[in-house]
Image: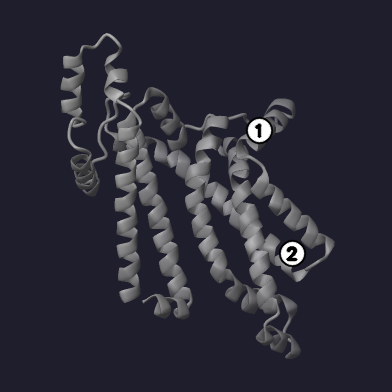
Amino acid sequence: MRFFLSRAAAAVLTILLAITLAVVLSDAGGDPVRNLLGPQATRADVAKERATLGLNRPLSSQIVSEIGDVAQGNFGTSLQYDRSNLQLIESRLPYSAELMGAALLLAILLGVPLGVLAAVRENSWIDRVSMTGALFGQSVPLYWLGMLTVLVFAVDLRWFPAGYAGGVSHLILPAVVLATFSLGAIARLTRSSMTQVLDEPYIMAARAHGLREGRVVFRHALRTAALPVVTMIGLQAGALISGVVTIEIVFAWPGLGSLAVSAVSFRDFPLVQAIVIFGAIVFVAINFTVDVLYGLLDPRVRHSRA
């Protein structure tokens, strides 16, 4: 319980810091009222609108007010759409969740077996090719890879649609591109962790007792090597929140990323602030869940952190 409460307290503190940072950056980004009312607006009109939006209050008061609103599920109102920011986020969230979920699932299903195979065949051509591909996935810019896949597979070969949300065929290209970085990270960490575990004495003892290699690798070695990989998967799930912005723009995917870019272009700071805070909450929730699972999987972590 002490371990759980300590991680929960850290998560709440992180969310409070994220809200504070979002409000401070929004305040430093300029005055959205002037952009909303246009250049013909008088000073009196601007002052009145700022008072209506609560932008004339001290920064500390805005931060406290924002924390209270978020605690009640109130993320403000969009200046561009004149709708609740939470309603706008909820309308776009399923598309982003679908894309990120498919990308993360693809990264896990390919990255873990690839890392295990590279570790079992250490220093072989399989190991070198696999890790070279993983390094390429972590190095290539996603926007460039996205445009290249559209050009090759959508324009030239016409195998998949070039963008927009639809059926499974529309999801394949953006999910594969978004999964590239996470796949490389998971594969490399799995390979590194498995390589260390396969040299442990208890693995040698299991082999000496005549256990089949598959059982040694997947039942004994992978179970221990999976602990840091679980943490990496959680971190990559959070990192996909930022990576999805680029992919949604390239593939015209109607998710939170494209909504955020539209809000930035319009200088709709309340909506940008709401998306940032919502993304921070999701990121913290994912890492909190992984942290607790890590403690459950490894009692040493649970007792040392408590």
Tell me if 137 is positioned left or right of 254 in this view: right
* Residue 41 lies in quadrant: top left
User: CA separation, marks 1 and 2?
Assistant: 31 Å
Q: In this view, does 162 lie above or below 123?
A: above
Q: Residue at x 59, y 52 (%)?
A: 182
Residue position marked by numbered label 1 in the rendering: 160
Helix, strand or loop for disc 1: loop
The answer to which of 210 and 303 lies nearer the viewer is 303
Q: Where is residue 109 in the image (x, y as percent from the top left)?
A: 62, 57
Tell me if 158 is positioned left or right of 26 in this view: right
Query: Image quadrant for the C terminus?
Result: bottom left
Residue position marked by numbered label 2 in the rendering: 118
The answer to which of 190 and 14 lies nearer the viewer is 14
Counting residues from the start of the chain, the first of labels 1 and 2 encountered is 2
Q: Residue at x 66, y 86 (%)?
A: 202
Q: Residue 95 carries which label?
A: none
Tell me if 194 is positioned left or right of 265 in this view: right
Please say whether residue 77 is visible from this viewpoint: yes
Tell me if 182 is positioned left or right of 10 in this view: right
Residue at the extreme right: 125
Q: Where is residue 46 in the image (x, y as percent from the top left)?
A: 21, 19
- CB-based contact (under 8 Å), mark 1 and mark 2: no
Query: Image quadrant for the N terminus?
Result: bottom left
- Give, as a three-letter code, the residue at label 1: Phe
Q: Residue at x 21, y 43 (%)?
A: 60
The crowd level at tag 2 (other Cα within 10 Å; few <14, some 14-19, many 20+) is many
